[in-house]
Image (cartoon, coloured by chain):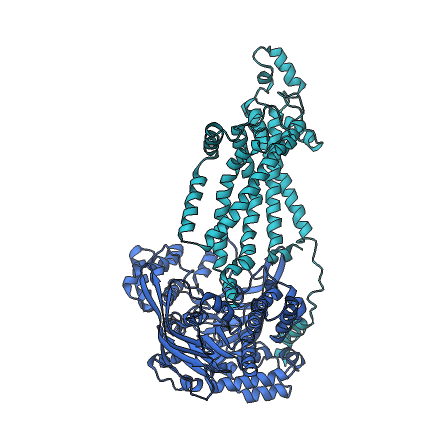
């Protein structure tokens, strides 16, 4: 299938025609990309979207000629009139870095840990003999400054581990920009970053595309990122480009079956009242909300309650406070979403509720009973633990690879041997019941985790979490490792289980859209503090706390119209000094 | 309004976070490099003491009546033996004997040899430099071949050259060094008569050995082969690990050629764990020297250790054990420090 951007008279920078990639292994030949064609013009951003295994990363590596030796590539890839597939290795070394460069997904590992940041930027310049070594050192510092690294002279002499993930990605961008390439291939450049950092990196990329007429091939699974910076979109599925066209057309009126399903599976967020929010911010009437310390209604019984709880981590003899004075109530039969960026302390709260780390101050109670984090549990402690289920982020590593699915689900029953479920037959019946509840076929009971897909494993995780019929479920990023269509199914399963069994749930996630779809109320954490708690419907459209506003404005919306509003709001809010000053200057309501 | 007074934290917190000066705090002494070094040295001291205690106890168990009978020979009367044991303090309770021994060592006195007409310190001073010479030569030669070889294999992983070298490696690795040494003696010393099979009679000096390197050839080959096989395997797997790192892909995307990526990026990152391994390898090296020295009659620590064990030369044996224990703890301490210094990620934590 051919994806052609509307002709604008400008010659395309990159033309890919009938690209086929196969991997030849001892077990056989696997097709990865089938007959793909697309083109990109100067200054344009083409987004190649799809789920894992769709062939989008293979396409990007094929353009740079960096596929492993087992790949067979046919078709035509033309960069500025030159056929890349016919270029030899020596010629490709001249092209790579100078005419086409690349950004990668994992900024944490993309840089050499034992080489200074400056030397790594210099290398691309000296490789292509752009300038002398002394000149390259100067240019490297300039480039680091241009991509927004503070104090670039000092940073150039430092090592990558001294930089944050976002800063490392900026360094990789500086490397990619150094020789002013015609095309930059960006493979999931913001996936590993927090949303506020992601928004900054996307701003930078958009600015670069506009300023330098560099063409971008953006590989991503995130439709919000697409809506934010892409001009054209090509949707890949199983190695085929199933649809392509202008960004708004594909996102708003997808034509192909698969695109429709993919876009329908994306968790949605309501359009926020950006005008009100920005006006309030401009007038300086944004207030720091008081976190409600008690329940809205007194007749609701709390299932899980943090009462002024502070949590410390001790490392090397020094304590680090990961959560400060948290007061939060999760009422029975309610899902409370807990959002925040990495390091905000949201997982710490979950671990504390499970009794894995103690609260240094304050108390944590489940159904009125305190949760203790001691290693030797009393009968009472065990009874409390039985009321708490947990599901983790990584469905692959949170199941024992040497236990069958039935054994995985059954294990909590053996540990706690609750009344009525102590016999072997009773346990087997319970396992069968739960497999049915999470919509897995009963014969999966005898399989091992590696035989299941990620989504199926996460359903097993769900079944295990509720096998003891807990009153509280802690779900820590349960769908973060999953593709969006699989995520939709797992979330559906969690929702129907919650409706059927009526447990309360602390739903921890970095993804505001998922939290919006799942929870009745939302709690927002920032740097170890609970900054805002509110009804989902109101918090998502009219956040109160400056940090929540900043967070919400940074989440890219898959709806291009809403995304345009968010970007505008972000721009206006950014001009108001910064959010911290805003928060600091805000008078209490 | 009341609800605000109940929860004033967020505003204050935001201001606090912004106002906090980050870099002005001085690092406390605990957790600094010197604190780390002192802690490690104390640990090392403890380990050395523990080793002497174990060996001391073992030897006491082997000769519960004291070494007098063994040293004075069969002709000695019981009175003579008792007198000898009493003169040397061997009739004291064991804890007292041990205490005396440790006190002596702390004063730099390792005691006198029972069999040789010299102090333990003299015996060791005579032998140790020669073992250091032999071990250092073995190490340098083995590494000079093993490191490039491991890298070469890693870049040709799964191809004929890699398989061939791996095969040779396994043959060397699985051949005991005494057997390898015997083979070399039979071929080069007896059949071809190219090289001497043993060190010259008497106790030659280091200078003599350096002036006549012929005597060193076969011992060095025997001693370095096992090390070569071990370290080329380490280097191969360290390089393979690094070749699949993301930073290699970044470097390739910059237009750096495959071979330049290896030279500029991969070598240093792969060397870090291998060089750190060297420290831990030091005691293994000493053990290897014991066999080699015995085989070629090379007058080093290994031979001294062996002879004194056979002759029940108590003080010399303890001295040797002490030296080896010291080498072990110093080696592992050096390994940790070198590794930390080579890797900028840990270097920051040490300083």
As drawn, which residue projects farthest toward the left? A443
Q: Is residue A581 left or right of residue A501?
A: right
Q: Is residue A567 left or right of residue A77?
A: right
Q: Quadrant of residue B140?
A: top right
What is the x, y in percent for residue A481? 44, 68
What is the x, y in percent for residue B121? 67, 29
Q: Closest to the observer: A18 or B191?
A: B191
Q: Is residue A292 visible?
A: no
Q: Is residue A381 visible?
A: yes
Chain A: its colour in the image is: blue
The C terminus of chain A: image quadrant: bottom right
Q: Closest to the observer: A539 or B78?
A: B78
What is the x, y in percent for residue B21? 70, 68
What is the x, y in percent for residue B22? 68, 66
The N terminus of chain A: image quadrant: bottom left
Q: In the rendered picture of this protein, how many numbered marks are placed on residues? A: 0
Chain drawn cyan, letter?
Answer: B
Q: Closest to the observer: B155 or A114?
A: B155
Q: Quadrant of residue A274?
A: bottom right
**Residue A106 position (above or below residue A573):** above
**Residue A543 position (above or below residue B143):** below
């Amino acid at each position: 299938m051919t994806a052609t951007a509307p002709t604008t008279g400008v010659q395309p920078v990159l033309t890919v025609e009938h690209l086929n990639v196969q991997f030849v292994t001892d077990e056989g030949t696997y097709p990865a990309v089938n007959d793909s064609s697309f083109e990109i013009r100067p200054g344009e951003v083409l987004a190649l979207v799809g789920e894992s295994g769709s062939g989008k990363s293979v396409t990007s590596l094929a353009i740079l000629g960096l596929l492993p030796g087992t790949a067979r590539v046919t078709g035509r890839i033309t960069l500025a009139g030159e056929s890349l597939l016919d270029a030899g290795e020596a010629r490709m070394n001249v092209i790579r870095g100078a005419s086409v460069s690349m950004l990668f997904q994992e900024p944490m590992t993309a840089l050499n840990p034992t080489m200074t940041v400056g030397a790594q930027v210099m290398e691309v310049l000296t490789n292509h003999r752009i300038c002398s070594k002394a000149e390259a050192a100067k240019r490297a510092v300039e480039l680091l400054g241009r991509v927004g690294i503070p104090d670039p002279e000092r940073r150039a002499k430092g090592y990558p581990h001294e930089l944050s993930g976002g800063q490392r990605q900026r360094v990789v961008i500086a490397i990619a920009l150094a020789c002013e390439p015609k095309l930059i291939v960006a493979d999931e450049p913001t996936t590993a970053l927090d949303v506020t950092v992601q928004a900054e990196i996307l701003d930078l990329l958009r600015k670069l595309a506009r300023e330098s007429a560099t063409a971008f091939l953006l590989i991503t699974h995130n439709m919000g990122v697409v809506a934010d910076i892409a001009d054209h979109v090509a949707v890949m599925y199983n190695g085929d480009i199933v649809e392509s066209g202008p960004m708004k057309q594909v996102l708003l009126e997808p034509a192909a079956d698969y695109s429709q399903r993919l876009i329908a599976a994306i968790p949605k967020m309501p359009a926020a009242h950006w005008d009100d929010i920005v006006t309030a911010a401009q007038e300086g009437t944004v207030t720091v909300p008081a976190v409600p310390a008690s329940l809205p209604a007194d007749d609701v019984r709390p299932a899980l309650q943090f009462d002024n709880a502070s949590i410390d981590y001790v490392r090397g003899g020094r304590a680090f406070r990961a959560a400060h004075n948290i007061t939060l109530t999760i009422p029975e039969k309610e899902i409370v979403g807990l959002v925040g960026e990495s390091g905000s302390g949201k997982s710490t709260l979950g671990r504390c509720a499970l009794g894995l780390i103690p609260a240094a101050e304050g108390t944590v109670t489940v159904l009125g009973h305190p949760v203790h984090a001691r290693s030797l549990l009393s009968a009472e402690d065990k009874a409390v633990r039985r009321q708490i289920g947990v599901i983790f982020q990584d469905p692959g590593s949170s199941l024992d690879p040497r236990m069958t699915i039935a054994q995985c689900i059954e294990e909590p029953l053996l540990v706690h041997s609750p009344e009525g479920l102590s016999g072997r037959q009773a346990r087997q019946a319970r396992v069968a019941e739960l497999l049915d509840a999470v919509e897995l076929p009963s014969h999966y009971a005898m399989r091992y985790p590696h035989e299941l897909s990620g989504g199926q494993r996460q359903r097993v995780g769900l079944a295990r979490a509720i096998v003891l019929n807990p009153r509280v479920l802690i779900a820590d990023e349960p769908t973060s490792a999953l593709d969006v269509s699989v995520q939709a199914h797992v979330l559906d399963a969690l929702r129907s289980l919650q409706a059927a069994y009526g447990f309360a749930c602390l739903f921890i996630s970095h993804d505001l859209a998922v939290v919006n779809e799942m929870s009745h109320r939302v709690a927002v954490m920032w740097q170890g503090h609970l900054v805002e708690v509110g009804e989902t419907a109101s918090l998502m459209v009219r956040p109160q706390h400056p940090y929540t506003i900043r967070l919400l404005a940074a989440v890219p919306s898959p709806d291009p119209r809403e995304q345009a509003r968010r970007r505008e709001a972000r721009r206006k809010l950014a001009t108001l000094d910064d959010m911290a000053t805003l928060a600091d200057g805000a008078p209490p309501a | 309004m009341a609800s605000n007074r109940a929860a004033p934290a967020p505003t204050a917190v935001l201001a606090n976070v912004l106002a906090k000066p980050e870099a002005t705090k001085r690092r406390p002494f605990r957790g600094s490099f010197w604190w780390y070094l002192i802690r490690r040295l104390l640990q090392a001291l403890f380990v050395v003491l523990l080793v002497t205690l174990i060996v001391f106890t073992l030897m006491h168990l082997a000769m519960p009546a004291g070494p007098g009978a063994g040293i004075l020979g069969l002709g000695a009367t019981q009175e003579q033996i008792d007198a000898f044991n009493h003169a040397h303090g061997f009739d004291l309770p064991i804890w007292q004997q041990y205490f005396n021994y440790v006190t002596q060592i702390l004063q730099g006195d390792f005691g006198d040899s029972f069999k040789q007409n010299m102090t333990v310190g003299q015996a060791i001073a005579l032998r140790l430099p020669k073992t250091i010479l032999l071990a250092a030569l073995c190490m340098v030669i083995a590494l000079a071949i093993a490191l490039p070889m491991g890298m070469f294999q890693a870049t040709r992983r799964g191809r004929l050259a890699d398989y061939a070298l791996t095969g040779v490696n396994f043959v060397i690795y699985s051949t005991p060094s005494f057997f390898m040494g015997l083979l070399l003696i039979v071929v080069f010393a007896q059949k071809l008569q190219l090289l001497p099979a043993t060190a010259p009679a008497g106790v030659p000096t280091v200078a003599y050995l350096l002036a006549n390197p012929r005597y060193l050839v076969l011992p060095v080959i025997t001693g370095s082969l096992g090390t070569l096989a071990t370290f080329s395997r380490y280097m191969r797997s360290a390089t393979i690990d690094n070749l699949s790192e993301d930073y290699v892909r970044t470097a390739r995307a910059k237009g750096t050629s495959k071979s330049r990526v290896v030279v500029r990026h991969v070598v240093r990152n792969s060397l870090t764990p291998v060089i750190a391994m060297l420290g831990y390898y030091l005691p293994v090296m000493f053990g290897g020297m014991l066999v080699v020295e015995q085989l070629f009659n090379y007058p080093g620590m290994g031979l001294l250790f062996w002879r004194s064990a056979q002759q029940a030369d108590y003080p010399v044996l303890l001295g040797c054990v002490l030296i080896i224990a010291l080498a072990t703890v110093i080696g592992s301490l050096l390994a940790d420090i070198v590794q930390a210094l080579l890797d900028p990620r840990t270097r920051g934590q040490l300083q």
